[in-house]
């Protein structure tokens, strides 16, 4: 537009937004930094803290700086043109294993845990898990899958394999990771919401590669679940440039689940309903991975709506918990152990959709449904050893075939 | 000693852009103050507008709420208006 413009940004986002400006080709963008947060404050407080206050970065009066940003002439650096080609650096590194561990960690290429060092031999072994060419481009990923605010990095089959090795994966896990990566869905979102990501796996591949869907389903209790989840985060960090605190990670309080994410196999054998994959339009024995993102789930026993009694009305309790969720942004998902799912089925909800209709019905005296059908999901996973389940903010995103990546 | 592979993906190239020329003065100019819709941002932007009214009485300020449906979604009608009528733009908030 060629009209001088100044964006207002909280100083807490200094690293992120200066990097963003550089990546957009405007390294000298004149951003006005202000004290925040801004929301939640009265106009009087904003007048005191911001208008009559100083820039937290350099201590200068905000409003005078703002005026200067419009009136001080551009410098030679601010008028440069051209293109800067960026590469990812050397293709290989040679050193002792100890030094390489330190190199990878210092460069923020890890999750701060020791990695399996990705030698050419280890990566070649990993690549046996797929028939796809190593140099085939799998997709693009950025620190958020909403919009184009952050730049997208491009990656190949081999790039995914390198990170799968680092996470400790077996070659037979690679098709799952390629399928997930092909969606471009990052495991570590930049958002200050401190999101967590989840994948739900359906189909015979669960037993083939050892995905746990019984006791401990949501946790780190099987090699496949744990390392696939870890690899998804490493892929986000290295192939999507995610997880860099201050620039591509701004989660205010953070989320411990980001280390290995939530990797669940659905307990199809014990579930009284169709698998999630079938409900999303796939065939019963298709190998499918479905992705979710949100604030995360919590044991339903922690919700005030829950109670403990000799005879429980689980459908009503689940509905009361759903009624406390925030539906408008990220939806809600319940992960029901098979006993709970069977309770619900025996209460007359023959399909998941039947149950969802009950869950979303307006509260007494109101007209508005609590949720839209596509803003809630029910997963059946876990053991049969007790009446436990988890509910929370997880929004269904997409489902993709795994087998095309074998 | 062992040799290991680089784990990174490939970032896109950066195309440098020239910034718009600056103004010699704010007197007689029109500044559009654009609210991108982030909760509470309008309060701050309206305070900024009040400040300009008090301190730069010869500068016209126009407060606008950006449409488009999302924080970073373009509002083409507003952009066209800014192109025609604005000398400068302040836009906020990031948070």
Image (cartoon, grey):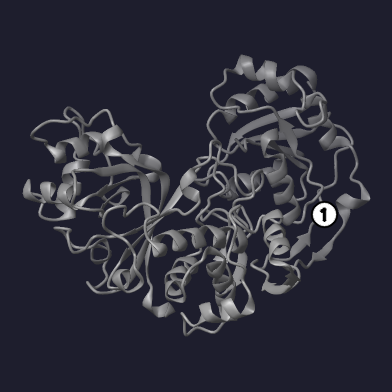
Q: Residue at x 87, y 57 (%)?
A: A80
Residue A321 drawn above or below residue A124:
above
Q: Secondary structure at mark 1?
A: loop
- Name the image quarter holding residue A284: bottom left
Q: Farthest residue to the right: give it.
A: A76
- Residue A186 pos. (x, y %): 51, 57
- Residue A321 pos. (x, y %): 25, 35
Disc 1 sits on a residue from what chain? Answer: B
Would you say residue A323 is visible in this rendering? no
**Nearest the camera: B11 or A366?**
B11
- Name the image quarter holding residue A137: bottom right
- Name the image quarter holding residue A101: bottom right
Would you say residue B76 is visible in this rendering? yes
**Nearest the camera: A62 or A72?**
A62
**Nearest the camera: B9 or A382?**
A382
Is residue A126 found left or right of A283 in the rendered image? right
Residue B81 drawn above or below residue A151:
above
Total numbered labels = 1
- Residue A259 pos. (x, y %): 50, 51
Is residue A88 found left or right of A119 in the rendered image? right
Q: Residue at x 89, y 45 (%)?
A: A74
Is residue A125 found left or right of A203 in the rendered image? right
Residue A234 drawn above or below residue A390:
below
**Nearest the camera: A225 or A357?**
A225
> Which residue is under mark 1?
B18
Is residue A189 found left or right of B17 in the rendered image? left
């Amino acid at each position: 537009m060629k009209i001088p413009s100044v964006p207002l940004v909280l100083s807490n986002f200094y690293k992120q937004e200066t990097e963003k400006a550089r990546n957009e080709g405007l390294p000298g963008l004149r951003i006005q930094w202000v004290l925040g947060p801004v929301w939640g404050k009265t106009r009087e407080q904003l007048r005191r803290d911001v208008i009559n206050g100083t820039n937290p970065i350099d201590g200068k009066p905000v409003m005078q700086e703002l005026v200067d940003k419009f009136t001080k002439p551009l410098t030679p650096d601010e008028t440069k043109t051209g293109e800067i080609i960026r590469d990812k650096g050397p293709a290989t590194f040679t050193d002792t294993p100890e030094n390489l561990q330190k190199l990878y960690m210092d460069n923020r290429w890890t999750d701060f845990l020791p990695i399996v060092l990705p030698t050419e031999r280890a990566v070649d072994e990993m690549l046996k898990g797929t028939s796809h060419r190593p140099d085939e481009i799998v997709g693009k990923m950025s620190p958020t899958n909403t919009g184009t605010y952050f730049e997208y990095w491009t990656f190949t089959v081999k790039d995914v394999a390198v990170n799968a090795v680092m996470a400790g994966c077996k070659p037979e896990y690679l098709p799952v990771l390629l399928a997930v990566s092909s969606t471009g869905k990052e495991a570590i979102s930049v958002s200050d919401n401190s999101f967590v990501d989840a994948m739900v796996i359906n189909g015979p591949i669960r037993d083939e590669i050892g995905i746990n869907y019984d006791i401990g389903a949501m946790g780190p209790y099987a090699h496949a679940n744990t390392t696939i989840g870890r690899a998804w985060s490493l892929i986000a960090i290295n192939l999507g440039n995610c997880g860099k605190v201050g620039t591509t990670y701004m989660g205010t309080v953070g989320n411990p689940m980001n280390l290995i994410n939530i990797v669940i196999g659905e307990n199809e054998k014990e579930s009284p309903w169709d698998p999630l994959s079938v409900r999303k339009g796939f065939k019963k024995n298709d190998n499918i991975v479905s992705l979710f993102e949100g604030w995360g789930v919590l044991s339903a026993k922690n919700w005030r709506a829950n109670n403990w009694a000799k005879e429980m009305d689980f459908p009503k309790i689940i509905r009361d918990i759903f009624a406390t969720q925030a539906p408008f942004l990220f939806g809600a998902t319940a992960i029901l152990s098979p006993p709970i799912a069977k309770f619900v089925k025996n209460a007359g909800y023959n399909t998941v959709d039947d149950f969802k209709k009950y869950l979303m019905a307006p509260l007494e005296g109101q007209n508005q449904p609590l949720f839209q059908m596509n803003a809630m999901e029910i997963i059946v996973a876990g053991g049969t050893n007790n009446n436990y389940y988890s509910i929370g903010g997880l929004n269904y995103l997409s489902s993709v075939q795994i087998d095309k990546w074998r | 000693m062992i040799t290991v592979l680089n784990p990174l993906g490939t970032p896109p190239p950066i195309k440098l852009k020239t910034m718009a020329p600056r103004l010699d003065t704010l007197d007689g100019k029109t500044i559009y103050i654009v609210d991108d819709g982030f909760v509470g941002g309008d309060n701050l932007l309206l305070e900024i507008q009040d400040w300009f009214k008090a301190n730069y009485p010869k500068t016209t300020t126009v407060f606008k709420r950006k449409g488009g449906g999302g924080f970073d979604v373009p509002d083409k009608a507003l952009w066209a208006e800014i192109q025609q009528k604005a000398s400068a733009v302040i836009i906020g908030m990031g948070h």
